[in-house]
Image (spheres, rainbow, N blue to C red):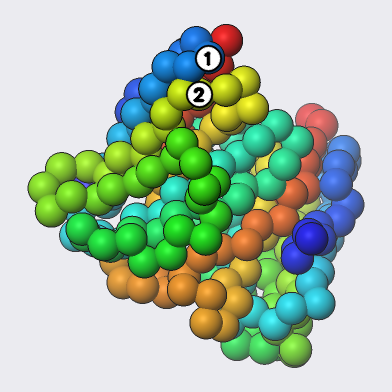
Amino acid sequence: TQLLEQSPQFLSIQEGENLTVYCNSSSVFSSLQWYRQEPGEGPVLLVTVVTGGEVKKLKRLTFQFGDARKDSSLHITAAQPGDTGLYLCAGEEAGANSKLTFGKGITLSVRP
Amino acid sequence: NAGVMQNPRHLVRRRGQEARLRCSPMKGHSHVYWYRQLPEEGLKFMVYLQKENIIDESGMPKERFSAEFPKEGPSILRIQQVVRGDSAAYFCASSLLAGNEQFFGPGTRLTVL
């Protein structure tokens, strides 16, 4: 059972465009994290959201945690080729003993 | 301040051999997690260890796989009698405290011939 669904699975856009991608679940998470992974490397933590409705900004990236703590979105403003990569969301369920459940990821390609 | 270190980065084994994967957590971190990433799949939790203790091994296959995190030295993920289906990228993560943010290493890519 895939607990975290990420969409779209693949996204190819032109430099300068804005985009929003999603991470959805039927489960409630005590926290949710977004990672970015480059080919041949490990995931790099971008942000952790904890409170329902929370919005965090990291330069051109805006992360939002749903009010019910079941879903999250990532919005990128004026995408750049350097944003290309695999974006993973991961949730920690309450009482899950710190283990993270990952979505399959969103492959983003930003064309110059 | 070195991050999580894993070695080897690439490991090739023949069917039936043993694979030993090592993970050194970030300095000061005593919580270690192992995940496996299969082609076209997301990362799957395998095991969570805290110094000398296995806290949660609910994601570990019942046979051939074991993990340890001794008082001194790195955490080891051991796969005995490897099969082709074990080919994957294995990632280790560490955290300062339970429930804190997890920081990942670069992974070990295991290929079983």
Quadrant in which the N terminus of chain A is drawn = bottom right
Residue B84, placed above or below residue A53 = above
Residue at 57% over, 72% down = A92
* Mark 2 belongs to chain: B
Q: Are marks 1 and 2 in contact (CB under 8 Å)?
A: yes
Q: What is the crowding at mark 2: few (fewer than 14 residues within 10 Å), some, or many (at least 20)?
A: many
Residue A82, placed above or below residue B86 = below
Question: Residue A70 vs residue B22: left or right?
Answer: right
The answer to whether residue B11 shows anywhere in this view is: no
Residue at 70% over, 82% down = A28
- Is label 2 in a helix, a strand or a loop? loop
Residue in the foreground of this view, choosing between B84 and B39:
B84
State the mark number for residue B82: 2
Amino acid type, mark 1: Arg
Quadrant in which the C terminus of chain A is drawn = top right
The answer to whether residue B31 shows anywhere in this view is: yes
Residue at 52% over, 82% down = A95
Residue in the foreground of this view, choosing between A42 and A74:
A42
Residue B71 at x, y percent in the picture: 13, 53
Residue A8 at x, y percent in the picture: 88, 52
Q: Is the same chain shared between marks 1 and 2?
A: yes
User: Among all residues in the image, which is located at the extreme front?
Assistant: B63
Q: What is the crowding at mark 1: few (fewer than 14 residues within 10 Å), some, or many (at least 20)?
A: some
User: Among all residues in the image, which is located at the extreme left?
Assistant: B72
* Mark 1 belongs to chain: B
Residue A87 at x, y percent in the picture: 68, 49
Residue B66 at x, y percent in the picture: 38, 43
Residue at 31% over, 35% down = B22
Amino acid type, mark 2: Val
- Is label 1 in a helix, a strand or a loop? loop
State the mark number for residue B15: 1
- The span from disc 1 to disc 2 (Cα, nearest Å) is 5 Å
